[in-house]
Amino acid sequence: MKKLLIAFAVMFWATASFADNAPNPPALVRRVSIFSTSTDWQAITGLLLNEYRGHFKPDSKLIGTRGLVLYYLDGFPCYGLGEGVRIWMGPNNKHDGDLRIACVYAPETINFSWRNATRDADDATGTGLLTCPVDADGRDLTIDLSKCQKGKDWSEYK
């Protein structure tokens, strides 16, 4: 029994001494999960949420030769609905996805994260902020991409 305790103590000491020389593990990256609060806006404002659909007027300069991927960025008075927040537009008026948002009233401007990419590109980091004026006709929104303003690239935000 005495030998077993001594063996255990030596093994513990050896393990502890090697642990001090081990390389440090990589830093933990914490990500914030964001859950939409759209169900609360009706109660908070007393206004009803309605679904709006966005239609785009393409701009070949912004779309480029590969295409343009837009991600709608939530912001009062509107919040994205499920699959309706990612839109790809390509050359020759090709597109997939529709902008679908729930709003307490029609927005005057909306923001997107944007990047130039092909239709089936993965969901990589976008280039930056794109702010677009909106023309509303009932619950149909028209976004003329030639009138959008590019903001800062994401790497410029602190």
Image (cartoon, rainbow, N blue to C red):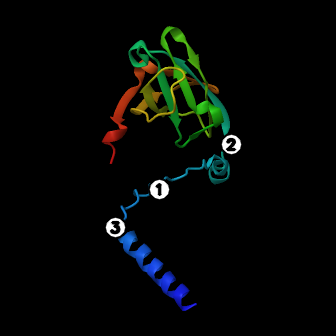
Give the residue displayed 58% in from the left and 33% down from the top.
85
Marks 2/3: CA–CA distance: 61 Å
N-term mark: 2 or 3: 3
Is residue 157 positioned above or below 100 on the image? below
Which amino acid, by three-letter code, is at mark 3? Asn
Residue 154 placed where, x, y %? 37, 39
Q: Nearer the viewer, mark 3 or mark 1?
A: 3
Amino acid marked by disc 1: Arg
- Residue at position x 64%, y 32% from top? 83
Which of the marked residues, 3 or 1, is nearer the chain's N terminus?
Answer: 3
Q: Quadrant where the N terminus lies?
A: bottom right
Residue 58 is situated, as x and y percent measured from the top left of the image, at: 48, 15
- Snapshot quadrant of residue 141: top right
- Residue at the disc numbered 3: 21
Of labels 1 and 2, earlier in sequence is: 1
- Mark 2 against mark 3, which lies toward the viewer? 3
Q: Find disc 2 in the rendering and name its residue.
A: 48
Residue depicted at 47% across the width and 77% down the height? 11
Packing grade of label 1 (10 A; few <14, some 14-19, many >=20) is few
Residue 115 as seen in the image, left or right of residue 74:
left
